[in-house]
Image (cartoon, grey):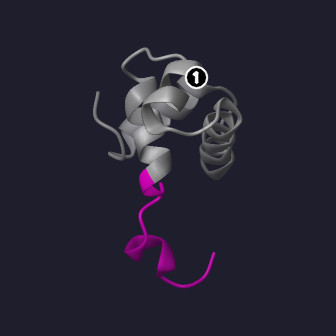
Amino acid sequence: MKGNDQHAKPLLTNREREVFELLVQDKTTKEIAQQLFISEKTVRNHISNVMQKLGVKGRSQAVVELVRLGELKI
């Protein structure tokens, strides 16, 4: 990590946030893809990128961690 960059920059990109906001509404990968006009593969990429950033395994752990960090409201 470099200096204080992490405070200035939000953890999630806008797109990752959109994906997770739909994920917590119980949307499937396919539904998220259709709603955001992106491919299912792209949805899965966003989800795995976020899991990597957080160092968690699994979508539900990622959601729990994002809520804990105040990045996501459910």
Q: On the image, numbered disc 1 is attached to which residue? A: 29
Secondary structure of the residue carrying tag 1 is: helix
Q: Is residue 62 above or below residue 23?
A: below
Q: Residue at x 47, y 50 (%)?
A: 15
Q: Residue at x 71, y 35 (%)?
A: 41
Q: Is residue 60 above or below residue 20?
A: above
The quadrant where residue 70 appears: top left
Q: Residue furthest left?
A: 73
Q: Residues within 10 Å of mark 1 (few under 14, many from 20)?
A: some
The quadrant where residue 48 appears: top right
Task: Give yes or no for residue 13 being in the magenta stretch.
Answer: yes
Q: Residue at x 49, y 79 (%)?
A: 5
Task: Give yes or no for residue 45 being in the magenta stretch.
Answer: no
Amino acid at circle 1:
Thr
Q: Residue furthest bottom?
A: 3
Q: Which residues are magenta?
A: 1-14
Q: Quadrant of the N terminus?
A: bottom right
Percent position of residue 8, x then y? 39, 76
Percent position of residue 16, x then y? 50, 47
Q: Quadrant of the C terminus?
A: top left
The quadrant where residue 39 appears: top right
Q: Is residue 67 above or below residue 10?
A: above
Considering the whole magenta stretch, tell me its main secondary structure.
loop
Mark yes or no: residue 64 visible.
no
Percent position of residue 24, x then y? 40, 23
Q: Residue at x 41, y 41 (%)?
A: 18
